[in-house]
Image (cartoon, rainbow, N blue to C red):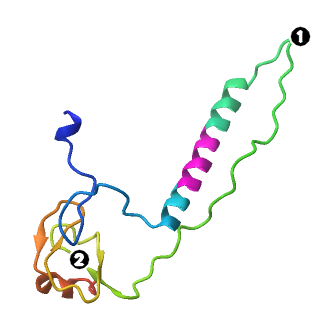
Amino acid sequence: MQDSDASPAAYCPYCGATPEGRWDTDAQAAYFQAHAARLGAEYVATQFREMLEGLSSSFLQVSREQADLPPDPGAPPPESLEGFRLVRVPCHPDDPLKIDAPWSDDVACPLCGITYPISDVAGLGSSQ
């Protein structure tokens, strides 16, 4: 499969277009970056520690110190429903999306792009 044949990662729930830029908030992007940096550093430290395990000779002495990892980012930033309503689309009911409360046009599933009239899916958000 070529890159041009790949499915888009997400669709805009308002217009159904695929993203050109970022959809995440600055807080979400910062959390993701901090979390990825921590996971990457932990992986490298573990691999390095395993590589040095048992490495010793009369000419070489290896000692290990605790890895200096980036700080743990903690829990992801909270998401607010204030000013939004939760909508569940029939094609992916386990992946609800937030829509501006006053929105009255069709909505698109962010995972597959199928559009639905808001009147058909607005009541599905409060279930489950």
Quarter assignment of residue 98: bottom left
Residue 122 position in % (x across, y down): 19, 85
Helix, strand or loop status at disc 1: loop
Give above or below for 30 relative to 99: above
Instruction: Tell me the residue at 73%/26% (across/down).
Output: 53
Residue 39 position in % (x across, y down): 58, 47
In this view, the residue in front, 128 or 40, is: 40
Residue 79 is left or right of residue 75, and the answer is left
Mark number, residue 88? 2
Q: Residues within 10 Å of mark 1 (few under 14, many from 20)?
A: few
- The residues tagged by marks 1 and 2 sit, at their Cα atoms, a distance apart of 66 Å
Q: Are marks 1 and 2 in contact (CB under 8 Å)?
A: no
Residue 39 is left or right of residue 108, and the answer is right
Quarter assignment of residue 105: bottom left
Circle 2: residue type: Arg
Q: Residues within 10 Å of mark 2 (few under 14, many from 20)?
A: many
Residue 90 visible in image: yes
Stretch of the chain drawn in magenta: 33-43
In this view, the residue in front, 102 or 53, is: 102
Query: Magenta stretch mostly in which secondary structure?
Result: helix
Mark number, residue 58? 1
Residue 125 position in % (x across, y down): 26, 83
